[in-house]
Amino acid sequence: AKILACEKVPKAKKLLKLQVDLGYEQRQVVSGIAKWYEPDQLIGKKIILVVNLKPATLCGIESNGMILASGEEEVRVVFLDPETPLGERVR
């Protein structure tokens, strides 16, 4: 997915709200990565998004997916090559 927009969630120190393009649809995702990333750093990046999950509500905002990241103390989002087609499946 490609991140189209990203903003901090008011009254939540850890959460970012992202609008992403999967190539066949757009979704809203809420992720607890605000400690490690500023919204401007993420816009335009391609990421791996888990989409076969039930929607979840975080701080009153519906999230329709989960960003793939690694780490505990230092979290790193898995970014894809810019040439990766939107909607391509992970194998």
Image (cartoon, rainbow, N blue to C red):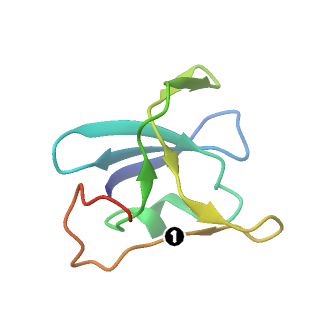
Which residue is farthest left? 24
Is residue 3 positioned above or below 64 on the image? below
Give the SS element for disc 1. Answer: loop
Is residue 5 positioned above or below 57 on the image? below
Image coordinates for residue 79, horizontal then vertical, percent: 44, 72
Is residue 38 positioned above or below 15 on the image? below
Q: Residue at x 21, y 78 (%)?
A: 83
Type of amino acid under label 1: Val
User: Which residue is tagged 1?
Assistant: 78
Image coordinates for residue 65, horizontal then vertical, percent: 46, 39
Q: Residue at x 51, y 70 (%)?
A: 78
Figure quadrant of residue 51 = top left
Image coordinates for residue 44, horizontal then vertical, percent: 31, 66
In terms of depth relative to the viewer, which is nearer, 22 or 28? Answer: 22
Quadrant the N terminus occupies: bottom left
Image coordinates for residue 61, horizontal then vertical, percent: 53, 24
Q: Residue at x 71, y 59 (%)?
A: 35
Q: Residue at x 50, y 25 (%)?
A: 54
In terms of depth relative to the viewer, which is nearer, 76 or 10? Answer: 76
Which residue is farthest right? 73
Report how many numbered discs are placed on residues in the image: 1
In terms of depth relative to the viewer, which is nearer, 53 or 33? Answer: 53
> Dot 1 surroundings within 10 Å: few (below 14), some, or many (20 or more)?
few
Determine whether, in the image, residue 63 is placed left or right of residue 69: left
Determine whether, in the image, residue 90 is placed left or right of residue 39: left
Quadrant the C terminus occupies: bottom left
